[in-house]
Image (cartoon, helix red, strand yellow):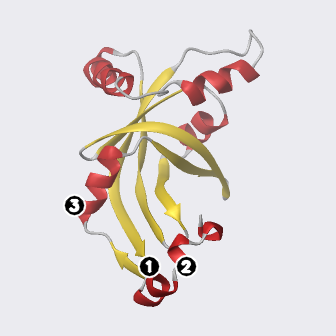
Amino acid sequence: MWISEMTEKECREFLARSTFGRLACARESQPYIVPIYFVYEPDHLYGFSTFGQKIEWMRSNPRVCVEIDEVPNHFRWKSVIVSGRYEELTDEPKYRAEREQAQILLEKRFLWWQTAYAAMQLRSEKERDQPLFYCIHIEGMTGRNAMPDSVEVRVGFEDDPRAK
């Protein structure tokens, strides 16, 4: 298998067509990772959530990362890691335009609300909070791309059903 580093342009193109990833945050040296739907805008990821552990932890430590991948099989995959800073887009007037932009962009994506809605169903009526929008300000990103090498192609490993 050949693994190569993706260029920044390739990472950005990959983010632009992706909608699902895993957001990692930490508090008191304890990591926490959850699936999220998002939309990419240059230098930002926008997401939607309800209040819970993820939001509580990101409020206390806004340093986060998001992993996005595409894995058709063992021999072909892409993975991008975004490092950044969480910012909640509250109802305050200073966030109104960005919050509306985030909502408009997210609404174009299928199931953009699903993880927040599913989390809300787990809570009792009293615990339910208003949904919220957030932004991850991208401070860095790296990406890797894997492809089968000539031996794997020649031997047919890529077509082996066990590789999927």
Report, in whole angstroms, how far the alpha carbon at label 2 lies from the one at label 3.
30 Å
Asked whether disc 1 touches disc 2, contact meaning CB atoms under 8 Å apart, the reply is yes
Question: Quick check: 41 above or below 129?
Answer: below
- Give the side of residue 20 with respect to residue 84, left or right: right
Q: Nearer the viewer, residue 109 or 99?
A: 109
Which residue is pictured at 78% across the width and 14% down the height? 124
According to the picture, the residue beneath numbered tag 1 turns out to be 148
Amino acid type, residue under disc 1 in the picture: Pro
Report, in whole angstroms, how far the alpha carbon at label 1 lies from the one at label 2.
8 Å
User: Of marks 1 and 2, which one's residue comes earlier in the chain?
Assistant: 1
Question: Quick check: 20 above or below 144?
Answer: above
Question: Quick check: 61 above or below 92?
Answer: below
The location of residue 137, given as percent across then percent down, is 34, 45
Callout in the foreground (1, 3):
1
Which of the labelled discs sits on residue 40, or is there none?
none
Amino acid type, residue under disc 3 in the picture: Lys
Residue at the far bottom in the pictured view: 151
Disc 1 crowd, CA 10 A, few/some/many (<14, 14-19, 20+):
some
Q: Nearer the viewer, residue 98 or 146?
A: 146
Q: Is residue 50 visible?
A: no
According to the picture, the residue beneath numbered tag 2 turns out to be 157
The location of residue 53, given as percent across then percent down, is 67, 36
Which residue is pictured at 32% across the width and 54% down the height? 14
Which residue is pictured at 61% across the width and 26% down the height? 51
Amino acid type, residue under disc 2 in the picture: Phe
Q: Kindly state the secondary structure of the residue where label 1 is placed.
A: loop
Report, in whole angstroms, how far the alpha carbon at label 1 lies from the one at label 3.
22 Å
According to the picture, the residue beneath numbered tag 3 turns out to be 9
The location of residue 77, given as percent across then percent down, is 46, 66
Callout in the foreground (1, 2):
2
Q: Kindly state the secondary structure of the residue where label 3 is placed.
A: helix
Q: Is residue 148 visible?
A: yes
